[in-house]
């Protein structure tokens, strides 16, 4: 287990091998959770992941199932396909 020291500017360096293993780089946002005798550091989810989780919550609240969304997408794909096919036949 690596031991690091708190720097004079109050920063705590994280060893390179740990950063590489986690896929973290400079500028990575993390959450710090204070514990009784230490700190837990957790990765802050990407904005896309946060949006997906929020969307899942909305779906649950509204009673929408994933199957409903997929069926709707399939319907839209078929509709667009028919529109394109009709345009190609009419030269439009």
Image: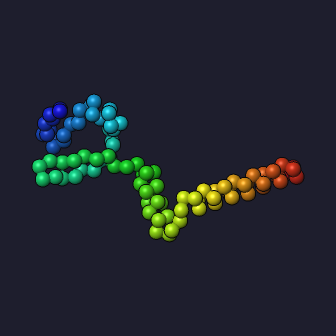
Q: Is 87 displayed left or right of 45 in the figure?
A: right
Instruction: Name the outermost residue toward the top.
Output: 17
Tell me if I can see residue 25 in this picture: no
- Image position of 78 with respect to 24: above or below: below
As rendered, which of 64 and 30 lies closer to the eye? 64
In percent of the image, x 34 and y 49: which residue is there? 44
Tell me if I can see residue 5 in this picture: yes
Q: Quadrant of the N terminus?
A: top left
In percent of the image, x 15 and y 43: which residue is there? 10
Q: Is 83 displayed left or right of 56 in the figure?
A: right
Q: Position of residue 13 (x, y in %)?
A: 21, 36
Q: Give the colour scheme shown.
A: rainbow
- Image position of 36 with respect to 10: above or below: below
Say which quarter of the image contains residue 20: top left
In percent of the image, x 14 and y 39: which residue is there? 6
As rendered, which of 73 and 27 lies closer to the eye? 73
Q: Position of residue 68 (x, y in %)?
A: 59, 62
Q: Position of residue 83 (x, y in %)?
A: 78, 55
Q: Is 87 displayed left or right of 62 in the figure?
A: right
In percent of the image, x 83 and y 49: which residue is there? 88
């Amino acid at each position: 287990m690596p031991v690091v020291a708190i720097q004079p500017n109050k920063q705590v360096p994280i060893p390179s091998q740990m950063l590489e293993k986690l896929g973290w780089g400079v500028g990575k946002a993390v959450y710090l959770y204070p514990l009784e005798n230490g700190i837990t550091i957790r990765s802050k989810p990407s904005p896309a992941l946060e949006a997906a989780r929020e969307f899942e919550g909305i779906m649950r609240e509204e009673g929408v199932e994933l199957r409903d969304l997929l069926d709707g997408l399939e319907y839209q794909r078929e509709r667009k396909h028919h529109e394109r096919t009709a345009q190609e036949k009419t030269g439009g």
